[in-house]
Amino acid sequence: QRCYQAADAKADAEIAKLKDKYQTKATSLQGQLQAAQDRAEVLEAERKGKRNDELLSTAGSILGSIFGGKRSRTSVLGKLGSAAGKRGRSDAAKERVEAQENKIQHIHHQLEQLEAELTDDVTSIDAKWMGVAKEISPMTVPLERTDVKVTQLALVWIPVP
């Protein structure tokens, strides 16, 4: 019984060390995840702004060139070229958002791996110490003459009634 308690205590001590080690890694990954999510929100807002700017600018430019005073072909083509440039910027913003979302998924995957590693380590520590506790068997230790020491010699007399 005491052997199992001692093994449990040793296993708990090793698991506490692991907890500290993995807690540091988990805290770091959670900080990275929060920063990545914040960055993704900023990039998404930027993407929406560029998309709206592209739509409004394109519609305004084309409608203005068609219905406005300038009706030349070069004017309309110039406005279309400007719209294409804005389209490229909004596409680039979309790609940045997608890249950030991939980064978030990667961090989630790292957190899952860390959790799996911790579970495996805890299981192996528990199995190791339970194995040690099970290997212990009772053993008789006979007394030897050198193990006994007489430290006080006394004669006791008890009267019997």
Image: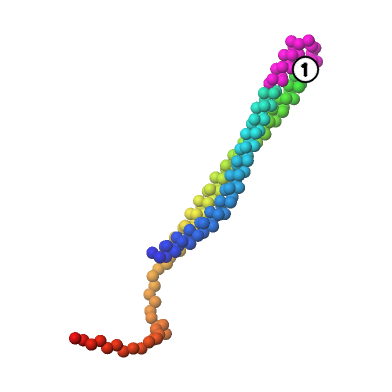
**What x and y, as percent, mark residue 13?**
50, 60
Q: Quadrant of the C terminus?
A: bottom left
Find residue 43 and report its image quarter: top right
Of 16 and 152, the residue lying toward us? 152
* Residue 90, magenta (yes or no): no
Q: Quick one: 77 or 47, which is closer to the camera?
A: 47
Q: Is residue 111 above or below residue 41?
A: below
Q: Residue at point 79% right, 13% down?
A: 73
Let me know if residue 72 is in the magenta part.
Answer: yes
Image quadrant occupied by the N terminus: bottom left
Residue flagged by tag 1: what amino acid is it? Answer: Leu
Tell me where residue 97 appears, x and y as whole percent.
Answer: 65, 33
Q: In the rendered structure, which segment of residues is drawn in magenta?
A: 55-75
Q: Which residue is mark 1?
A: 77
State how the image is colored: rainbow
In the picture, measured across the screen, residue 9 lies left or right of residue 87, that is left
Q: Main secondary structure of the magenta part?
A: helix
Q: Helix or strand or loop: what does disc 1 sit on?
A: helix
Identify the residue at image location x=38%, y=79%. 142
Instruction: Identify the residue shown where x is 62% and y is 34%.
Output: 41
